[in-house]
Image (cartoon, rainbow, N blue to C red):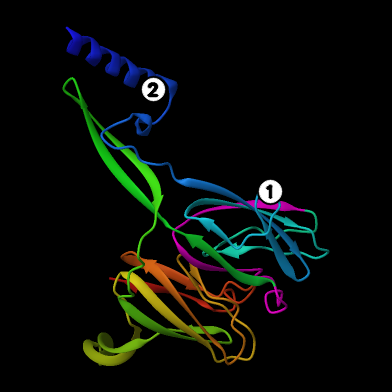
Amino acid sequence: MRRFVLAVVVCLAVAGTAVAGFSFAGVVGPTTAQKVAVTDINISAIEYDFIITDSSGARVTSAPAGVINFHVKNNGTIEHDFQIAGQKTPTLNPGQSATLTVTLNGGAYNYACTIGEHASFGMFGQFTITGQVQTTTQVITTNGTTITTTATQTQSTTAPKPVATVRVTEKEFKILLPSVKKRVAYFVRVKGKRVKKFKTVSVQKPVKHGLVRFVVKNTGKIAHNFVIGTGQTTIIKPGQSDTIDVTLAKGKRKFVCSITGHAAAGMKGTLVVT
């Protein structure tokens, strides 16, 4: 009788949670998973710098892995934006604000204002994320009913080694990645007949999925950057280089120079990840 009463109580608790609109992640199972960290970071954009503080007003350079809300306000006298991990705010006029929400794992993330030469004047830096976001699943069986719950937690982990290194060259206004020679067929008309011919062309070399290291060199005459996935370099001045590690899944991944106007001029492309 005691077992029957206990089962009824547990079932009612689960049903009550579902009616209330909450996730089953709140049900206590064999193990209890911590919720992902949510951190609010305030950013003041001025000429030419970013002042980064936490909710108490103290300056910070890092946050735990998880959801980061970057609350950006333009306290300057000209327009600015804020970009990190390949995502950025709209262009903000003086006095305007925007919130950029990103989920970040452990690592060092470059940030910058991508308008004109603002980053070259000092509006760039690096923000550190500590720990890793991990998703765990637990199965709870109650009175013959199985409930699968998913929770997210933050924990420390050792960063994996890159599976490949890609050398990137930037100049006005192109982004060049390693290529391979490929023989392709094409057809022409000769005396009314369709004739098959072959030619050799350069095709951008695909890269294996996983953690990929990009070594980016600016051989041009003005500053550029390189953005792919959640990775972005600093603003690279002519003759200088930067290196970023980015985890890429299989598929086609777009890359770009995110400085205003550069992508429109041709500094963009797609990398095939196998």
Left or right, 78 with reference to 38 = right
Badge 2: residue crowd in 10 Å (few <14, some 14–19, many ≥20) = some
**What residue type is disc 1 on?**
Ser
Residue stretch in magenta? 96-122
Q: Which mark is residue 240?
A: none
Where residue 43 sits in the image (x, y, percent)? 68, 57
| Residues at circles 1 and 2 in contact by the CB criterion of under 8 Å | no
Crowdedness near tag 1: few (<14), some (14–19) or many (≥20) residues, C-alpha within 10 Å = few
Q: Residue at x 62, y 74 (%)?
A: 259
The span from disc 1 to disc 2 (Cα, nearest Å) is 34 Å
The answer to whether 67 is drawn above or below residue 270 in the figure is above
Residue found at the far top of this picture: 1
The spot of residue 136 in percent (x, y) is 31, 45
Element carrying mark 2: helix
x then y, percent, for residue 249: 33, 64
* Rendered-image quadrant of the N terminus: top left
The label shown at residue 17 is: 2
Residue at position x 43%, y 25% in the image: 21
Secondary-structure class at tag 1 = loop
- Camera-near label (1 vs 2) is 1
In the rendered image, the vertical position of residue 161 relative to residue 96, given as above or below = below
Dividing the picture into quarters, in which one does residue 77 lie?
A: bottom right
In front here: 197 or 248? 248
Residue denoted by label 1: 56
Residue 105 painted magenta = yes
Indicate whether residue 221 is drawn in magenta: no
In the foreground, 153 or 239: 153
In terms of depth relative to the viewer, which is nearer, 79 or 261?
79
Q: Is residue 261 visible?
A: yes
Q: Earlier in the sequence, mark 1 or mark 2?
A: 2
